[in-house]
Image (cartoon, helix red, strand yellow):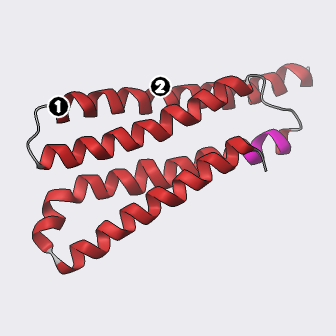
Amino acid sequence: MSTLSLRCIRFALFYLACGMSLGVVFAFDRATGALLRPLHAELNLWGWLTLLIYGMAYHMLPRFLGRPLRWPRAAAWQSWLAIGGVGLAALGWALLVMEAPIARPLMGIAGALQLMGALIFAGLMLDLFIDLRRSAR
């Protein structure tokens, strides 16, 4: 498995552990659960689920389609944008609970990083399929 796929999957597992740990805390402290529910969702959905999808897609789709990624360097950047975006968003949610003034701008930056990562990923995956259509003609 490539370092790219492994990086995405390892961080997905890390964010899963963080998100699930928060869920356990919520079971014992409902007030904290009400405050940190968005952080829990961020870690589980963008952290765990999305990064796992990225890692598995980078591993499987080029193999299934019989062609390598055309821009592996863009894929490496994409993974770091996505991983960093989740981390910054998580920090932003935690700072928002503490009413830190930097929280909202940080969350905006994190969201932009996540969006850029998602768009680059979509472009890389679409390129695999578009290239496949061209070669079939």
Give the numbered dot on residue 116: 2
- Tell me where residue 135 appears, x and y as whole percent: 90, 22
Q: Nearer the viewer, residue 119 or 98?
A: 98
| Label 2 packing within 10 angstroms: few (<14), some (14-19), many (20+) | some
- First-in-chain label (1 vs 2): 1
Dominant secondary structure of the residues highlighted in magenta in the image? helix
Question: What span is in magenta?
Answer: 59-63
The x, y position of residue 2, in whole percent, is 77, 45
Going by the image, does 23 lie left or right of 124? Answer: left
The residue drawn where x is 51% and y is 30% is 117
Q: Which one is in front, 130 or 73?
A: 73
Label 2 secondary element:
helix
Q: Estimate the spatial distance between the alpha carbons at disc 1 and disc 2, rounded to whole Å.
A: 21 Å
Q: Is residue 122 visible?
A: no
- Relative side of 17 to 88, left or right: right
Would you say residue 14 sits in the magenta stretch?
Answer: no
Q: Is residue 2 above or below residue 70?
A: below
**Percent of width and height locating residue 100:** 11, 38
Residue drawn at (83%, 45%), measured in percent from left and top?
Answer: 64
Q: Are marks 1 and 2 in contact (CB under 8 Å)?
A: no
Query: Would you name the residue on which mark 1 appears?
Result: 102
What amino acid type is highlighted by mark number 2?
A: Met
Rendered position, 89 above or below 73: below
Residue 78 visible from this viewpoint? yes
